[in-house]
Image (cartoon, helix red, strand yellow):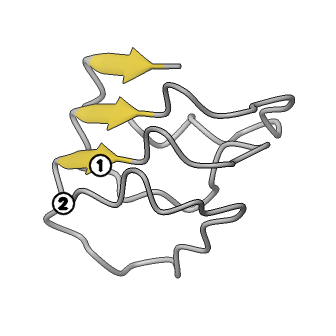
Amino acid sequence: LDVSKNMLEKVVLIKNTLRSLEVLNLSSNKLWTVPTNMPSKLHIVDLSNNSLTQILPGTLINLTNLTHLYR
């Protein structure tokens, strides 16, 4: 799912949605925190070119299939 370059400041992912999603591109937005409740089957998450200042505790704990995280 590519939602890059959309000037997003916040991404809300509802728990247990997008269960089959393996790649999430959130690059080049205006995010300041890593989204919570990301689908557990994600292999690749691209958060590059954002204004990230925090990652809440436990945000990445369920991403057991994650192989690449770009920030």
| Up-down relation of residue 66 to residue 12 (above or below) | above
Q: Tell me which residue sits at (56%, 35%) in the image.
A: 61
Could you tell me which quadrant the N terminus lies in? bottom left
Mark 1 residue crowding within 10 angstroms, few (<14) / some (14–19) / many (20+): some
- Between 32 and 13, the residue placed more toward the observer is 32
* Marks 2 & 1, CB-CB < 8 Å contact: yes
Amino acid marked by disc 2: Leu
**Disc 2: which residue:** 21
Which of these two is toward me, 58 or 54? 54
Q: Nearer the viewer, residue 27 or 68?
A: 27
Q: How far is disc 2 from disc 1 in space, using C-alphas?
A: 7 Å
Give the left or right position of residue 48, taking residue 44 as reference.
right
Q: Could you say whether the residue bearing mark 2 is in a helix, strand or loop? A: loop
Q: Is residue 69 shown above or below 43?
A: above
Q: Which residue is mark 1?
A: 24
Within the image, what quadrant is residue 19 found in? bottom left
At x 18%, y 60%, the residue is: 21
- Where is residue 63? Give x, y as percent: 41, 38
Judge depth for marks 2 and 1 and give the one in front.
1
SS class, disc 1: strand
Few, some or many residues within 10 Å of mark 2 (<14, 14–19, 20+): some
Q: Amino acid at mark 1?
A: Leu
Please provide percent x and percent y for residue 26. 43, 47
Q: What's the residue at 85%, 32% (across, down)?
A: 54
* Position of residue 29 in the picture relative to residue 19 (left or right): right
Residue at left offset 57%, top offset 35%? 60
Q: Is residue 27 visible?
A: yes
Residue 31 position, x and y percent, is: 69, 48
Mark number displayed over residue 58: none
